[in-house]
Image (cartoon, rainbow, N blue to C red):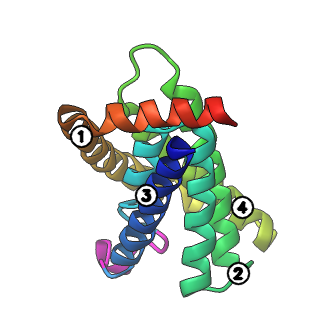
Amino acid sequence: MRSRTVKIAYFGLLTAMAIVLGYVERMIPMLDGSIPGVKLGLSNVVILFALYVMDDKSAFLLMLLKVFLLALMFSGLFSTTMMVSLGGGFLSFVVMAIMKRVPGTTVIAVSILGAVAHNIGQTLTASAILGTYQLLYTYLPAILVTAVVTGVLTGMVAQRVIVSLERTGVVKSIKKDNIRAEQTL
């Protein structure tokens, strides 16, 4: 029972961190607003951390909570913004979860691929909602360049956080508690 409680506590902490970073990210003007929708992806550091340290199910649930809670705070549930974010988040998660399993793939590479997938998912979702696929050849190429840059930055931060917390024993503790929690379910 203790392991399950600890896992829930870690999950709650990660959720709060993702929401706070998502909020902070909204306060940072990226490229002076010249490309709508371009963000640093700070909260994706938390998703990457969960993907590598917890498990895929927890990371996926964390991504969903992040999308829904940030939408609730800023744009409204089931708004176009939320749906576009959900489309990007879903594709990004799938790509990162798969690529994480490929031997030799670094956290930074997974982050870059996740950022690119996120922008592709967002653009496909926006195109479907708007009923126009012009965005795929007008808007998408511009944001893919920023996806690579932000993916590198996010990946570097996530990798550094994971390595630093591995040194302190926190990562080992989280993984051990996750294993125990899964065994009790």
Q: Which of marks 2 and 1 is nearer the N terminus?
A: 2
Q: Earlier in the sequence, mark 4 or mark 3?
A: 3
Q: Mark 3 points at which residue?
A: 14
Q: Nearer the viewer, residue 123 or 79?
A: 79
User: Which image quadrant is residue 168 in?
Assistant: top left
Q: Identify residue type, mark 4.
A: Thr
Task: Say whether marks 1 and 4 touch (CB < 8 Å).
Answer: no
Q: Nearer the viewer, residue 134 or 124?
A: 124
The 10 Å Cα crowd at callout 1, few under 14, some 14 to 19, many 20 or more, is few
Q: Identify residue type, mark 1.
A: Leu
- How far apart marks 2 and 4 lie (CA) works out to 16 Å
- How far apart marks 1 and 4 lie (CA) works out to 36 Å
Residue located at (38% from left, 32% from top): 109
The 10 Å Cα crowd at callout 4, few under 14, some 14 to 19, many 20 or more, is many
Task: Say whether marks 4 and 3 touch (CB < 8 Å).
Answer: no
Which of the two discs, 4 and 3, sits closer to the camera?
3
Q: Nearer the viewer, residue 62 or 40?
A: 62
Q: Mark 4 points at which residue?
A: 125
